[in-house]
Image (cartoon, rainbow, N blue to C red):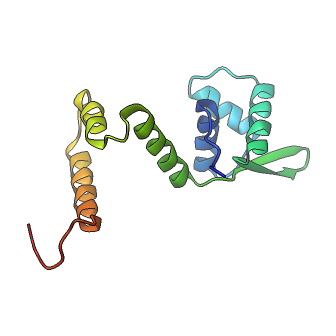
Amino acid sequence: MPEVQPTERELEALKVLWECGEASVREVCDALNKGGESLAYTTVLSLLQVMEQKGLVTHRSEGKAYIYLPAIARENTLRQLATGFLDRVFDGALDEYLVHALGKRRITADEIAQLEAMLAEAKEKSPGKKKGKQP
């Protein structure tokens, strides 16, 4: 069974939980509203309840309050969303995506270094790489 993909708002709530580790409904609500949303407490409560039904979060009781925890890993979720976006929008064409992603954005020297390191690692893992020969 494929993993459930969070909606945009669910992803924002998950980001809060990934950052905090766990949070009450009030804490999630405050964090989302700080990020520019204007959500009522009951809206966030309903959001978290739906997310729990989908298997995205779990909760535990602490007195009368529910404390919510992420039930899915950040890295796996972001990888799944990125792959889905790449396939859906660019038909899997990574080079075309990168041209669009980097074309309108200033990129720092640190980001270039990170990309170069990732490319070097990808080359090492590439199935077409011949052992014992240097390019």
Q: Is residue 66 above or below residue 45?
A: below
Residue 66 at what x, y percent from top left? 83, 45
Q: Name the residue nearer the viewer: 4 or 45.
A: 4
Q: Farthest residue in the left direction?
A: 135
The structure residue drawn at horizontal position 67% and vertical position 31%, both measured from the top left corner, is 30
Q: Is residue 103 above or below residue 119?
A: above
Q: Farthest residue in the top direction?
A: 38
The structure residue drawn at horizontal position 14% and vertical position 79%, both measured from the top left corner, is 132
Q: Is residue 91 above or below residue 113?
A: above
Residue 21 at what x, y percent from top left? 64, 53
Q: Name the residue nearer the viewer: 87 or 114.
A: 87
The structure residue drawn at horizontal position 59% and vertical position 35%, both measured from the top left corner, is 12
Residue 28 at what x, y percent from top left? 69, 37
Q: How many marks?
A: 0
Q: Is residue 127 left or right of residue 75?
A: left
Q: Is residue 55 left or right of residue 82?
A: right
Q: Farthest residue in the bottom direction?
A: 132
Q: Is residue 84 left or right of residue 29?
A: left
Question: In the figure, residue 92 lies in which quadrant?
Answer: top left
The structure residue drawn at horizontal position 60% and vertical position 49%, both measured from the top left corner, is 18
